[in-house]
Image (spheres, rainbow, N blue to C red):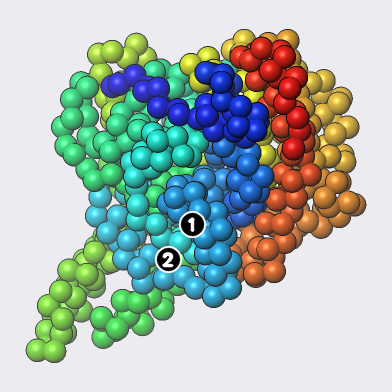
């Protein structure tokens, strides 16, 4: 366990340049956080538009923290993998959705490789077979690669949100802060517990605070799957996973490797259908004598299939590596089916296992954590920037939700009320009124705590009376195949407009919070751009 490092935030000069037009005699600057909500591919594209326009308007230089949930994390991570080059990032985005290409073979290879891990879960399948298809990307870089730009101060410090799914009951009952888990270029861990592990050792095995077994750092593709694992209705996701398994078994890439693949494929299809029905509760999964769900049918079938089929194929022209590849594929199918029936997501070694420094004995007794999309708690990462250690004075909250754009404000208000955290209070009646015809910007202030600027994506200022039509066009679970170039460009333009039209308001609030640090005569001398 380690305490959270204070990032080397060399952002003061950048803030002064952005807000005070080059007046750099002051030695301190307020802390500004930009938050991106979840919302699948819609949030991904809209968040890219927000970041692009903030950079274009010189506002990104004033930002200290950049935090996201779900789809926004895909956009934020792309900012760093492209070294902050938003022009190149936009061009690449448009290129990907013009060509509508997805490397199925490489994605499947990555998934099969992940299935060899003892902690394989649906998150691996989701990351490599679903999110990679949604974003048309398969990034192999790592969070630790982002250290240089944030330590040099050229980009804000990124924070990626998740929650511990095993603590969901505690969240539902008491909005427990320890439910939240964060990832940064330096660490991963529980802010509420002050417990972190180096990001390069996230996923490695620990016991009593000591490293027992090192595992390679997980790539960004996997982490994007973990951060964005709540794209829609549970049953829709379940159905999608089984559909993908059906497609792979009936017309998968491995079919050429087995002479009687077609008949075996149909048999496997029938078994998967049975497993799906069991997982949906239509028929309880059969149990063996030990009381455990009976998955041996799949294991035995695959073992028999592999053994008999390969014996028939021992011919001189056969690839000697094919036997191992087929075995790995069968293991992948088996594991994915079992994980789907158990609905197991985000499995990773608990770095706090048997750690004597943790008072929470339940936490230290768990061998594994199950980390999932933070949108299952609050669809924006307010809890990760509100702790006093972050000292945030101004929050720019960009909401890309498909439904009520103030649900995140309601949920955060409830969370803060539970734990006496300073946060602007807004009457429920007022939020109800705003949600009927949301404007593009709301400024929320309390007696103490940060100022919050909240920006609904779909608003009457940009969309007029067509908010519902916009929401339908960019439904959360709409697949990437429906996102043509025109659809992508329109969403980018909408997100950019929301920033551009509110630039003066943002600058005004930046200068207001700057008054906490700067003499009043200095703040008055600054003019709006």
- Taking the image as shown, residue 170 lies to the left or right of residue 115, namely right
Q: Nearer the viewer, residue 337 or 8?
A: 8
Residue 131, numbered label:
1
Q: Residue at x 82, y 20 (%)?
A: 427
- Taking the image as shown, residue 164 lies to the left or right of residue 353, namely right
Q: Is residue 155 visible?
A: yes
Q: Nearer the viewer, residue 150 or 227?
A: 150
> Residue 278 at what x, y percent from top left?
47, 53
Q: Is residue 383 visible?
A: no
> Residue 515 at what x, y percent from top left?
68, 16
Residue 489, placed above or below residue 101 = above
Q: Secondary structure at mark 1?
A: helix
Quarter of the picture containing the C terminus is top right
Q: Nearer the viewer, residue 82 or 104?
A: 82
Residue 416, placed above or below residue 228 = above
- Mark 1–mark 2 Cα distance, whole angstroms, equals 16 Å
> Residue 178 at what x, y percent from top left?
46, 21
The residue that disc 2 covers is 245
Badge 1: residue crowd in 10 Å (few <14, some 14–19, many ≥20): many
Quarter of the picture containing the N terminus is top left
Residue 316, placed above or below residue 50 = below
Badge 2: residue crowd in 10 Å (few <14, some 14–19, many ≥20): many
Q: Are marks 1 and 2 in contact (CB under 8 Å)?
A: no
- Of callouts 1 and 2, which one flags the residue occurring earlier in the amino acid sequence? 1
């Amino acid at each position: 366990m380690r305490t959270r490092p204070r990032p080397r935030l060399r952002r003061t000069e950048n803030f002064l340049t952005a807000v005070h037009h080059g007046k750099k005699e002051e030695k301190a600057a307020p802390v500004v956080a930009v938050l991106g909500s979840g919302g699948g591919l819609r949030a991904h594209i809209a968040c890219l538009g927000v970041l692009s326009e903030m950079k274009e308007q010189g506002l990104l230089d004033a930002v200290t923290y950049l935090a996201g949930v779900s789809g926004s994390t895909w956009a934020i991570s792309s900012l760093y993998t492209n070294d902050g080059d938003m022009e190149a990032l936009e061009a690449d985005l448009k290129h990907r959705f013009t060509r509508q290409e997805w490397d199925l073979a490489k994605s499947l290879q990555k998934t099969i490789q992940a299935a060899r891990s003892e902690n394989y879960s649906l998150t691996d399948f989701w990351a490599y077979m679903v999110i990679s298809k949604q974003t048309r990307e398969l990034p192999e870089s790592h969070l630790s690669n982002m250290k240089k730009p944030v330590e040099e101060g050229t980009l804000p410090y990124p924070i990626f949100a998740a929650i511990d799914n095993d603590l969901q009951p505690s969240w539902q009952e008491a909005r427990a802060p320890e439910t939240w888990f964060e990832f940064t270029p330096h660490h991963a861990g529980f802010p509420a517990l002050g417990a972190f592990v180096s990001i390069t050792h996230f996923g490695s095995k620990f016991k009593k605070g000591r490293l027992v077994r090192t595992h390679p750092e997980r790539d960004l593709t996997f982490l994007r799957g973990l951060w964005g694992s709540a794209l829609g209705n549970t049953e829709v996701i379940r159905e999608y996973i089984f559909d993908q398994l059906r497609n792979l078994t009936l017309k998968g890439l491995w079919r050429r490797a087995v002479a009687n693949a077609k008949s075996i494929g149909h048999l496997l299809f029938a078994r998967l259908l049975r497993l799906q029905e069991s997982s949906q509760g239509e028929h309880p999964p059969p149990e063996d004598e030990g009381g455990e769900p009976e998955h041996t049918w799949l294991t035995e079938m695959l073992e028999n299939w592999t053994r008999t089929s390969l014996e028939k194929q021992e011919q001189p022209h056969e690839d000697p590596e094919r036997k191992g590849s087929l075995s790995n594929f069968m293991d992948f199918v088996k594991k994915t089916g079992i994980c789907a029936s158990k609905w197991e997501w985000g499995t990773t070694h608990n770095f706090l296992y048997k750690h004597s420094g943790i008072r929470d004995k339940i936490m230290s007794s768990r061998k594994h954590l199950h980390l999932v999309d933070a949108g299952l708690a609050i669809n924006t990462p307010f809890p990760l920037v509100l702790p006093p250690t972050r000292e945030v004075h101004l929050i720019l909250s960009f909401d890309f939700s498909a439904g009520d754009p103030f649900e995140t404000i309601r949920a955060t208000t409830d969370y803060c009320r539970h734990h006496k955290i300073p946060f602007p209070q807004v009457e429920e009646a007022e939020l109800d009124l705003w949600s009927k015809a949301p404007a593009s910007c709301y400024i929320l202030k309390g007696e103490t705590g940060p100022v919050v600027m909240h920006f609904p994506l779909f608003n009457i200022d940009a969309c007029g009376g067509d908010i519902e039509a916009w929401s339908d066009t960019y439904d959360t679970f709409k697949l990437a195949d429906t996102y043509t170039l025109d659809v992508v460009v329109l969403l980018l333009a909408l997100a950019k407009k929301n920033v551009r039209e509110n630039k003066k308001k943002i600058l005004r609030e930046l200068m207001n919070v700057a008054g906490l640090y700067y003499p009043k005569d200095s703040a008055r001398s600054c003019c709006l751009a």
